[in-house]
Image (cartoon, rainbow, N blue to C red):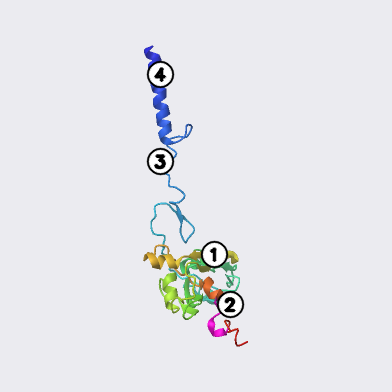
Amino acid sequence: MIRKHSSRLGFGLLLTALGASGAVGQSPLMSVGAPSQSAARENVGGTVDHDKTPVLQHRNWRYQLHSADVLQLSFPFTPEFDQTVTVQPDGYITLRGADSVRVESQTLPEATNSVRTAYAKILHDPVINVELKDFEKPYFIVGGEVGHPGKFDLRGETTATEAVAIAGGLKESSKHSQVLLFHRVPNGWVQVKKLNMKKMLRDANLDEDAYMQPGDFLYVPKNTMSKIEKFIPTSSLGLYANPAVL
């Protein structure tokens, strides 16, 4: 009798524990430390942020090579290979006596390693200095409902909200809850991020702001009222005429 009582008591405690964690059959460990879907938010870079840390990420500000950039290659011990090369539209540079190499989107140290690897096939442990002689100055473009849309130099770290301020600020006709940031990525793809500047400015919280990168295009669309405003009749149009005059 004592054993039966003990087993029933143990079974009752087990049911109580399962009931406290949810339905029977659900492990009480399933919800420990697991954030809810509403708690997880997606940041501007596409990664999920569970601990609500700021999503604003600093980028690597080393210059990345573009088409039409000009490089000076110097060979201290084999000067016969000294040359000036231009990054072609396909991203490659043509090397004297070696295979062409792709350097577009590489930093200068990365391009130096690429050139050194190419010449290592014909030179023993080559020493090469690569200098950037001419380059495309970084820029960004702001269009849409801003005071002065256009192309602007990208000087240092600039966020999307700062870019809008540089472009003359938001117009009253802007839909600043759905600002679009276009960024080109390798292989011809374009990344698009939607920024809710209305919320950021209202809450005085720029954690979800994004850093502009060279060549980025920021577009501020019109709000709905501005789109239909020209179709809304006003008294100045004489729509409400006096029937007695007719």
Mark 2 and mark 4: span between their CA atoms? 79 Å
Q: Which residue is mark 1?
A: 191
Mark 1 and mark 4: span between their CA atoms? 62 Å
Q: Which residue is mark 3?
A: 32
Q: Which residue is mark 4?
A: 7
Q: Main secondary structure of the magenta part?
A: helix
Residue drawn at x 48%, y 77% as measured from the top left: 146
Q: Position of residue 205 (x, y in %)?
A: 37, 64
**For the magenta stretch, what is the residue range?**
229-238
- Residue 92 included in the magenta stretch of the image: no
Q: Position of residue 207 (x, y in %)?
A: 39, 62
- Rendered position, 109 above or below 165: above
Total number of numbered labels?
4
Q: Position of residue 203 (x, y in %)?
A: 38, 64
Mark 2 and mark 1: span between their CA atoms? 35 Å
- Residue 235 included in the magenta stretch of the image: yes
Q: Nearer the viewer, mark 3 or mark 2?
A: 2
Mark 4–mark 3 contact, CB under 8 Å? no
Q: Which residue is mark 2?
A: 231
| Residue 86 in sight | no
Disc 2 marks a residue whose amino acid type is Phe
Disc 4 marks a residue whose amino acid type is Ser
